[in-house]
Amino acid sequence: MPTLPYYNKEKKTIESPHVVLLGAGASKAAFPNGDVCGRKLPLMSELTDVLDLESTIQKNGYLGNTTNFESFYSEIFNQSKYSNLVNEIQKRVREYFETLEIPD
């Protein structure tokens, strides 16, 4: 078995497995009308609204900016006072994305 990367002399190419990661923008562009049921594929800046998290965030005492979801989540993740909020966010994210179905 050849080691990676493998140079294919006949094709004059390097063959190796790879992974391509697409962000939320690519998903939204691919499915602008949402999933098969019209559920929105949110950008990170839309996640709080799509998951209807604002009241839950306020109820848990967070007063900072939630526009940049990745920064917001990183900020609260390791703070014990927000553990209930982190658990609720994880639950809602999982539930939402588990329901999405790719259209034909």
Image: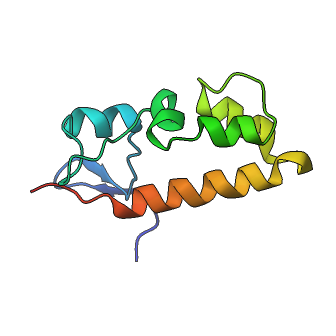
Q: Measuring 69% from the left and 38% from the top, which residue is drawn there?
A: 57
Residue 5 appears anywhere in the view:
no
Q: Measuring 17% from the left and 51% from the top, which residue is drawn there?
A: 11
User: Which of 58/15 is in front?
Assistant: 58
> Residue 55 at x, y = what percent?
63, 37
Q: Which part of the image, by quadrant, shows the C terminus?
A: bottom left
Q: Is residue 94 left or right of residue 57?
A: left
Q: Is residue 58 left or right of residue 38?
A: right
Residue that sits furthest to the bottom in the current view = 1
> Residue 91 at x, y = what percent?
59, 60
Q: Measuring 35% from the left and 62% from the top, which residue is drawn there?
A: 99
Q: Measuring 72% from the left and 51% from the top, which residue is drawn there?
A: 86
Location of residue 65 with respect to 15 vertically, above or below: above
User: Which of 102/59 is in front?
Assistant: 59
Splitting the image into 4 quarters, where does residue 69 fall? Answer: top right
Q: Is residue 60 left or right of residue 73?
A: right
Residue that sits furthest to the left in the current view = 104
Residue 65 appears anywhere in the view:
yes
Splitting the image into 4 quarters, where does residue 98 fall? Answer: bottom left
